[in-house]
Amino acid sequence: MKVVIIEDEKITARDLVQTIQQLFPQIGILKVLGTVKDSISYFSSDRSADLIFADIQLGDGLSFEIFSAVEIDVPVIFCTAYDEYALHAFKANGFDYILKPFTNESVSAAINKYLAFRGRIAENAVPYKALEQLFTTKKTTEIGAVLVYQKDRIMPVAISDIAFFYLKNGVVNLTTFDKKTYVVNKTMDELGKFTEPLFFRANRQYLVHRKAVLDASSALSRKLTLSLSVPVPESVTISREKMGQFLEWLTQR
């Protein structure tokens, strides 16, 4: 059996390759791809893979773009750190998923499921456009989740429970509406793409939930200062250049 892996995080890709080879020595890894562009180029000329492991959010777009650009009749096991609830749609249509960080058990279960249903997956194929809409619709951010780290525990926190994300000393934290704070292993740019339009990137440090904003004041400054319903480590300001964009976003309640 031949497998292609689409994953832009090199360490994660390497770990997945090693895990698959240790659990299933008979499986060959044809290729490891890191971008939408490279994947489209590869599958345009080589479609010999039996199974694809694909991260959803890549550095240059969503992996759904690959399957929209190239017709591929190969089942996909999606790997993602987001949308715990929406991912049930994958199972309902015959595919599986791995919620990051993956384990030996989750990889083994996903591959065994593919092997068990190998002859039936093509008949139950998921329309990739429908999946793309599932992850890009505005409502997605209301039911999604972000993985957080607390000591030796990893757990999901619902997007709807998060008041703001905050960057300090290179570390991203989130604070919930009930004032709990956790470390997040994602960049602010990645979180901004995933949580829009429910969240607004106020500045380099803050990404705020619309429902957390109480009011905004300008006083004598050329910036807006936000008041949030949850205490913040430092004041949240909006530059003059982003005021119009912020006020328009604020009216979309």
Image (cartoon, helix red, strand yellow):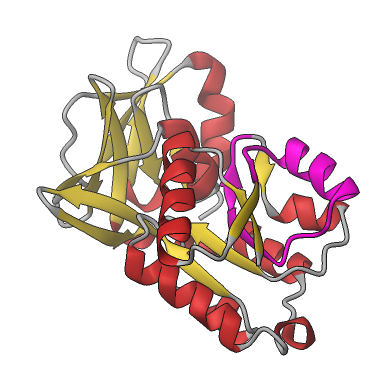
- The reply, left or right, for residue 149 in relation to residue 226 is left
Q: Can residue 86 be seen at all in this image of the molecule? A: no
User: How many discs appear?
Assistant: 0
Where 61 falls versus 167 (above or below)?
Answer: below
- The reply, left or right, for residue 50 in relation to residue 141 is right
Residue 43 part of the magenta segment: yes
Which percent across, then down, holds residue 88? 51, 79
Q: Nearer the viewer, residue 187 or 198?
A: 187
Where 100 falls versus 219 (above or below)?
Answer: below
In the image, what residue occupies the spot 34% across and 39% down? 215
Q: Nearer the viewer, residue 38 or 136?
A: 38
- The reply, left or right, for residue 232 in relation to residue 48 is left
Q: Nearer the viewer, residue 67 or 45?
A: 45
Where is the N terminus found, in terms of image quarters? Answer: bottom right
Which percent across, then down, holds residue 128? 75, 67
In the image, what residue occupies the spot 53% across and 82% down? 113
Quadrant in which residue 220 is drawn: top left
Q: Can residue 52 be seen at all in this image of the molecule? A: yes
In the image, what residue occupies the spot 77% across and 66% down? 129
Residue range corresponding to the magenta coloring: 31-59
Residue 152 part of the magenta segment: no
Which percent across, then down, holds residue 134? 63, 67
- Residue that extends furthest to the front in the rendered view of this protein: 26
Which percent across, then down, holds residue 27? 57, 63
In the image, what residue occupies the spot 54% across and 42% down? 193
Where 242 falls versus 64 (above or below)?
Answer: above
